[in-house]
Image (spheres, rainbow, N blue to C red):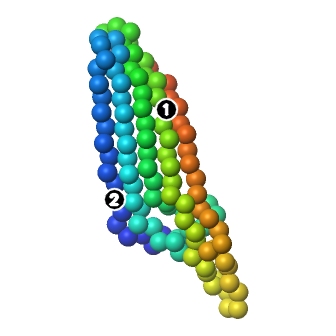
């Protein structure tokens, strides 16, 4: 693929509410620097923003449970027209590439 150097910035925070519970929050901003000419039906690298939050429950010194939820928003982009055979034109500029993902997680940690 034809990519330039992209960049990401991420911020995270964990706050102990009390001895049993902690709260987490995260944000991530990604700029892929992918060229529109690289987009196709199965792969398109869009700029994104990630938002996540979670709760950690410390049952005791050795057992811990994590519950989390996140959302990734991808910027929508139109493709770039492509001439792949002489006399033909694939009008990718009329195609909008977009997606969004919601995630949920449950984790368990046992400390030896």
Name the residue nearer the viewer: 51 or 89. 51
Left/right of residue 15 with respect to residue 74 in the rendered view? left
Q: Residues within 10 Å of mark 2 (few under 14, many from 20)?
A: few
Vertical order, 25 against 80 (above or below)? above
Quadrant placement of the C terminus: top left
Vertical order, 107 against 30 (above or below)? above
Q: Which residue is mark 1?
A: 69
SS label for mark 2: strand
Vertical order, 40 against 63 (above or below)? below
View extreme (top): residue: 60
Vertical order, 101 against 20 (above or below)? below
Left/right of residue 2 with respect to residue 90 in the rendered view? left
Indicate which disc residue 7 carries: 2
Residue 109 seen: no
Indicate which disc residue 5 carries: none
Residue 29 seen: yes
Where residue 81 appears, as percent x and y from the top left, is: 61, 79
**Reading the chain from its start, which is encountered first: label 1 or label 2?**
2
Where residue 92 appears, as percent x and y from the top left, is: 63, 74
Where residue 53 appears, as percent x and y from the top left, is: 42, 32
Q: Quadrant of residue 43?
A: bottom right
């Amino acid at each position: 693929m034809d990519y330039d150097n992209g960049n990401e910035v991420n911020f995270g925070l964990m706050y102990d509410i009390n001895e049993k519970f902690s709260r987490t929050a995260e944000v991530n901003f990604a700029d892929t620097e992918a060229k529109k000419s690289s987009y196709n039906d199965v792969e398109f690298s869009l700029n994104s923003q990630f938002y996540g939050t979670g709760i950690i429950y410390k049952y005791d010194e050795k057992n811990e449970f994590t519950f989390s939820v996140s959302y990734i928003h991808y910027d929508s982009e139109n493709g770039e027209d492509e001439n792949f055979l002489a006399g033909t034109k694939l009008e990718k500029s009329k195609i909008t590439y977009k997606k969004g993902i919601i995630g949920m997680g449950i984790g368990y940690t046992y400390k030896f």
